[in-house]
């Protein structure tokens, strides 16, 4: 690993990740708003997560095959430009189909950008602790973007007219942010000479390398962890707005705003862990996070049982459970960057691109499966059952973290 990168490059990475977080985390809000504006069913609206996941999967496969030829910086610029273009078009052609298209295209761009960004972190981090700390800070800005999602879309939500499409104008603001990230990154230098791929290298070799890495213990273990983490995080991010509205009785705008508390807690968790990791090993940090998330989720669900349904428009009247459930983000938020850093640093820097691509493939598949499944549980068994189901993936992560430690110990030996 090389010397630390200039502050300008780090700021570019933070802003890029923040911009995509706003867009991708709006899928939960879009699920709610498309039901109101276009009259689609809850299950049909939840397919937006499938289109997002399909796009991310495509972007990850492209990155895994061609990223070193394209270049990390150039890939991020392409992703930002394509995303800005499609986001501008949403308010002009607003419909359920248009929303599906925007999640497909921005998902594709994100898949490409994320692999490039993760690979860049490996390129500029001088050691394992620095890698874990920087990745945690980068992911903190993803959660800042998640929070801004709720604030931005709540500002454009019309509570009086359920058929209003005013919420679609939030995508225009997001397009401006994507362009700002593009023009900030464009002049920023990044030395990629150490990982640049030989143009004469056959195109099938990167794909073959990805397949070979996919059957290694570290990739298999990371795959299970990614699946469980994505289902858990997306369960809260995508369904808390609908849960607050349909189960807790909050008006849509307030439900969206208070769901944003999950992002606030996740930001605090990731930033705090970013400092903790400079002194504490990754394994006890993950164990503490999983235990804390489980306890808070159980207590939060128990508090929901006695909540009466009522139309609530003031946050002071909101039930305790509305504030308690998002606290799980304090513990769930840090899990993703820490487990990825642990897995990536078990490999040479030149292979980070391939493992990051596999991670995005795993995550896109998990998101495409997990969110609609929770939608089915939500519709047929209720919101409490849907959130209670998240105890399952938390248990899977506990097993996966122990397995990852053994894999790393074996690699060192």
Image (cartoon, rainbow, N blue to C red):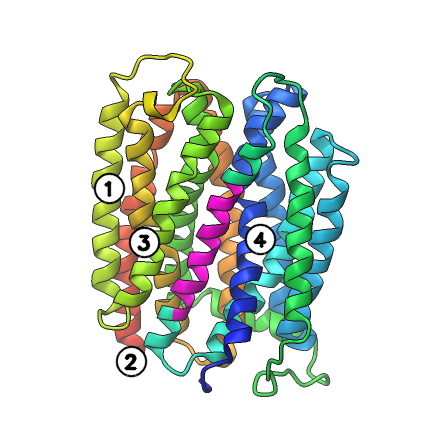
Q: On the picture, is 36 further left or further right than 145?
A: right
Residue 392 position, x and y percent, is: 31, 39
* Earlier-in-chain disc, 2 versus 3: 3
Q: Name the residue under label 2.
A: 412
Which quarter of the figure has residue 157?
A: top right
Q: Is residue 323 above or below residue 330?
A: above
Find residue 269 and name its label.
Answer: 3
* Earlier-in-chain disc, 2 versus 1: 1
Query: What residue lies at 22% left-to-right and 46% top-to-bottom?
Result: 292
Residue 383 position, x and y percent, is: 39, 24
In the rendered image, the quadrant that contains the N terminus is bottom left
Query: What residue lies at 67% left-to-right and 34% top-to-bottom?
Result: 168
- What segment carries the magenta color? 134-150
Residue 10 position, x and y percent, is: 51, 71
Do labels 4 and 2 touch, CB within 8 Å? no
Query: What residue lies at 68% left-to-right and 49% top-to-bottom?
Result: 175
* Earlier-in-chain disc, 1 versus 3: 3
Return the residue nearer the eye: 350 or 316: 316
* Earlier-in-chain disc, 4 versus 2: 4
- Helix, strand or loop at mark 4: helix
* Earlier-in-chain disc, 4 versus 1: 4
Q: Mark 4 points at which residue?
A: 20
């Amino acid at each position: 690993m090389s010397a630390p990168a200039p502050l300008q490059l780090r700021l570019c990475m933070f802003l890029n990740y923040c911009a995509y977080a706003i867009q991708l985390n709006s899928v939960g809000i879009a699920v709610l708003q498309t039901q109101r504006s276009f009259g689609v069913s809850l299950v049909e609206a939840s397919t937006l997560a499938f289109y997002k996941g399909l796009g991310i999967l495509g972007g990850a496969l492209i990155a895994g095959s061609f990223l070193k030829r394209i270049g990390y910086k150039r890939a991020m610029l392409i992703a930002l430009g394509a995303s800005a273009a499609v986001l501008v078009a949403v308010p002009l052609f607003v419909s359920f189909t248009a929303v599906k298209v925007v999640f497909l295209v921005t998902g594709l761009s994100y898949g490409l950008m994320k692999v490039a960004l993760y690979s860049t972190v490996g390129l500029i981090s001088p050691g394992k602790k620095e890698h874990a700390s920087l990745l945690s800070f980068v992911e903190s800005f993803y959660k800042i973007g998640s929070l801004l999602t709720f604030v931005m879309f709540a500002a454009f939500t019309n509570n009086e007219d359920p058929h209003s499409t005013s919420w679609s104008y939030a995508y225009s603001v997001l397009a401006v942010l994507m362009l700002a990230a593009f023009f900030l990154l464009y002049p920023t230098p990044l030395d990629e000479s150490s990982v640049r791929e030989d143009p004469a290298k056959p195109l099938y070799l990167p794909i073959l390398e990805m397949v070979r890495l996919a059957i290694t213990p570290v990739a298999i273990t990371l795959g299970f962890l990614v699946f469980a983490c994505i289902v858990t995080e997306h369960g809260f991010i995508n369904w808390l707005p609908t849960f607050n509205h349909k189960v807790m009785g909050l008006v849509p705008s307030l439900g969206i705003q208070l769901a944003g508390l999950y992002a606030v807690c996740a930001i605090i968790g990731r930033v705090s862990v970013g400092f903790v990791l400079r002194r504490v090993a990754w394994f006890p940090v993950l164990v503490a996070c999983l235990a804390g998330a489980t306890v808070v989720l159980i207590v939060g669900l128990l508090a929901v049982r006695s909540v009466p349904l009522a139309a609530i428009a003031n946050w002071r009247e909101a039930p305790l459970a509305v504030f308690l459930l998002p606290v799980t983000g304090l513990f769930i938020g840090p899990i993703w960057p820490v487990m990825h850093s642990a897995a990536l640093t078990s490999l040479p820097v030149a292979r980070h691109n391939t493992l990051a691509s596999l991670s995005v493939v795993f995550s896109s598949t998990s998101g495409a499966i997990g969110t609609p499944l929770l939608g089915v549980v939500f519709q047929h068994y209720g919101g409490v059952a849907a959130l209670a189901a998240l105890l399952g993936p938390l248990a899977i992560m506990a097993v996966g973290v122990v397995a990852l430690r053994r894999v790393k110990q074996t690699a060192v030996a």
